[in-house]
Image: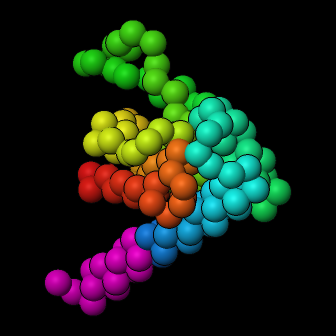
Amino acid sequence: MNAGNAEIGRRGGAELIDESLIENKISSSIIDAAIEVHRVLGGPGLLESIYEDALAYELELRNIPIKRQLYVPVLYKGTPVREPLRLDLLVHDLVIVEVKATESILKVHSAQVLTYLRLTQRKIGLVLNFGQPLLRDGISRVVNKF
């Protein structure tokens, strides 16, 4: 490998590291906002949609860009299959957030987020379950390893 290729390799690696750091920082900001929502509204006991609305508002208050209820098409050999899926939140166009208000996070919830990550070619997702007495017990991080 010549010196030029070595430099490109180092820069490429740095970009991957930088992106991972950004995604981790975004995830941390989302979790901080979710903890605030859980603290103010209390939990468990409310509908998922209420927690989602409050989390979206809290993220907006913190000037964190979000998109809500995004349609994600499911394609089979290039053809849409049925209705598109809808993800709850996309934060900074990088991190997918699925809001739950159940007794516990099930494997299917993490699998759902992993599917969203694959379909949208994103790397990091969070399942936030506001149905737990302590929100920290209701947080699941999902990583798409491509």
Q: Quadrant of residue 67?
A: top right
x and y percent of residue 118 in the render?
34, 41
Does 22 appear above or below 113?
A: below
> Magenta region: which residues?
1-17
Q: Residue at x 74, y 45 (%)?
A: 54
The spot of residue 122 in percent (x, y) is: 42, 49
Looking at the image, which is closer to me, 23 or 132? 132
Lateral position of residue 2 relative to residue 25, left or right: left
- The reply to whether residue 93 is in sight is no
Instruction: Determine the main secondary structure of the stretch shown in magenta.
Output: helix
The correct choice, above or below, for 73 with respect to 98 in the image is: above
Indicate left or right for 61 with 30 as reference. Answer: right
Q: Is residue 5 left or right of residue 71?
A: left
Residue displayed at 27% across by 56% down? 145
Q: Name the residue located 46 percent from the left edge and 49 percent from the top edge.
A: 127
Residue at the limit of the structure toward the bottom, as seen here: 3
Residue farthest to the right?
A: 61
| Image x and y of residue 138, in percent | 46, 54
**Is 121 covered by the magenta stretch?**
no
Quick one: 2 or 36, which is closer to the camera? 36
Tell me the quarter of the picture where residue 20 sits: bottom left
Which residue is at 28% across, 42% downward? 107
Tell me: residue 20, above or below residue 113.
below
- Where is the N terminus found, in terms of image quarters? bottom left
Whole-percent x and y of residue 79?
34, 13
Q: Residue furthest left?
A: 1
